[in-house]
Amino acid sequence: MQCQQCGSSIDYRFATTCLSCNRELAATGNDSDPVGHNDNGHIGHLKLGHHLANLAVIVVTALAGLVVGAVVTYLAGGCVYVLIYGNEVKDGYSCERGTAVGFLLLFVGAHLGSVSGGIFGFANRIYKRADSNVKG
């Protein structure tokens, strides 16, 4: 894109003002617009392939968060469990308690990890509508 006032080149992906004259960015060039703009200037919808790519990103980050969350909470909770109950080895009750706490840590960590991974994937999706960055 070109600045209307001084004509210097501006990359709209990284800058919103002209570095030479500090004027607010206005579209005057024939550069490609972000996804979602039609030729007549109206905001359109994303294509099916864009939605599927966004969905794939969300699913992959949720699965990665599931595994990472389960492992981190299991290891951290296991260390705390050993510190608290390390010397109490009695009958089968300590084994049952340890198994229950271990499974609880795995399930809680997997749940929290998948939710936070899905939120991260949604926030960092590949294709966004052109008007989704407007604040107000």
Image: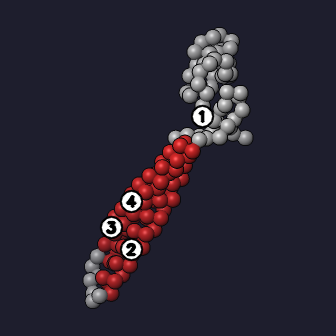
Residue beneath label 3, please?
A: 79
Residue 85 seen anywhere in this rendered image of the structure: yes
Q: Position of residue 112 (x, y in %)?
A: 48, 62
The Cα atoms of the two marked residues, 3 and 2, are separated by 14 Å
Q: How much space separates mark 2 and mark 1, taking CA atoms?
A: 44 Å
Q: Which residue is mark 4?
A: 67
Q: Nearer the viewer, mark 3 or mark 1?
A: 1
Q: Which of disc 4 and disc 2 is earlier in sequence? A: 4
Residue placed at 50% from the left, 45% from the top? 53
Q: 33 or 77, which is in the foreground?
A: 33
The residue at the far top in this view is 6
What amino acid is found at the position of numbered circle 2 in the picture? Phe
Closer to the chain start, of discs 2 and 1, is: 1
Badge 2 marks a residue whose secondary structure is: helix
Q: Earlier in the sequence, mark 3 or mark 1?
A: 1
Q: Quadrant of the N terminus?
A: top right
Observer-nearest of 34 and 135:
34
The one of 111 and 37 positioned closer to us in this rendering: 37
What residue appears at the point 73 percent right and 41 percent down from the top-left corner? 136
- 10 Å neighbourhood of mark 3: few (<14), some, or many (≥20)? few
Give SS at disc 4.
Answer: helix
* Residue visible at 54% across and 53% down in the picture: 119
Closer to us: mark 4 or mark 3? 4
How packed is label 2: few (under 14 Cα within 10 Å), some, or many (20 or more)? few
In the picture shown, does residue 48 fall above or below 93?
A: above
Around disc 4, counting alpha carbons within 10 Å, would you say few (fewer than 14), some (14 to 19), or many (20 or more)?
A: some
- The residue carrying mark 1 is 35
Distance CA(mark 2)–CA(mark 4): 14 Å
Residue that mark 2 sits on: 103
Q: Nearer the viewer, mark 4 or mark 1?
A: 1
Residue 70, image quadrant: bottom left
